[in-house]
Amino acid sequence: MTVYLFHQGHNRRKEAQVHFRFSIFDFRFLALRCPGCCIVLAAVFFAVNFCAAATNDFFAQGVELIQAGQFPEAAAAFEKSAHAQPAAGTLVNLGLAEWQRGHAGAAILAWEKALWIDPFDPRAGANLKFARQVLQVDAPQLKWFETASTWLPPNDWVSLAGASLWLAVGLLVLPGIFRRRKAGWQQMLAAFAAGIFLVCLTANLGVVSRTHIGFVLKKNTPLLLTPTREGEVISTLPAGEPARRLRTRGDFFLIRTAGESGWIEQSEFHLICQ
């Protein structure tokens, strides 16, 4: 198995950072008139920096622990780092630690989450392909609009939909507001932007639909006929088996796998996106 170990400073696609941008005004005047505002801004600034430092500490601890062969401790550190600031590289390392400690289902879930954040990450894709070959489990069966939604990260589809919508509206409305005649290129560009907007709507529908996909965490997990621990066992599912959540009742999910449906405890089945 090819081992892909991330270092946070070399991620190809870095997560969005928090930037504070202030309007143009006299900050000294604000400090004199509203010292409480300055205190609040300073508290927010230090809180953000403290969270970023804590995330970096957890990631660095995870790298050291995984290199030392302490995989359970490394998985816990990477999980804390991913919870504070989700990143594809962190989740790839989390999957590696889970795989090395024998938790194949959790490893597949972590690598799927990495692809959710960055569909272009080759490390997560290669690890998933290897793990599924070893475990003899299939990838999730996606509908055509769900497949289209994997071409870009979910947030990019939202941004592209908003940009294309406003571009189309602006090209159609602004010439009338400024009492100018619409040029042919403006109408063509507006039509193109409207087409992009429709594609983005379809992709966003696929993103929402994929949030119901999850993975079995433990091997030989019972699939039950009723949502009770005493329910009849229909079959047992392997670790990493994909399924769709249909509905929830108490501590159980009704899921549908490639061949059957049944109930499973929530602790034994996690969604790709909570």
Image (cartoon, rainbow, N blue to C red):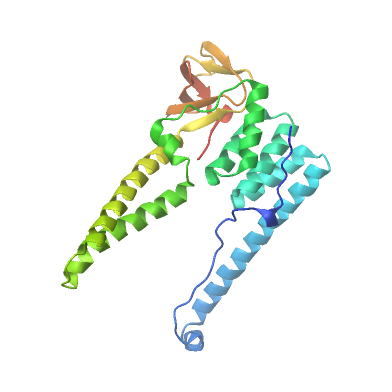
**From the viewer's perspective, is residue 16 above or below residue 248?**
below
Figure label count: 0
* Residue in view at x 84 percent, y 43 percent: 68
Q: Nearer the viewer, residue 34 or 221?
A: 221
Question: Along the horizontal axis of the image, is 272 left or right of 1?
Answer: left
Which x, y percent locates residue 119?
A: 54, 43
- Residue 115 falls in image quadrant: top right
Residue 218 seen in this snapshot? no
**Residue 206 at least partly seen:** yes
Q: Residue drawn at (62%, 24%), measured in percent from left and top? A: 239
Quadrant for residue 173, please give it.
bottom left
Q: Residue at x 76, y 48 (%)?
A: 63
Residue closer to the observer: 178 or 62: 178
Residue 260 in the image, given as x and y percentages of width and height:
47, 15
Nearer to the camera, 183 or 39? 183
Residue 37, image x and y in percent? Answer: 49, 77
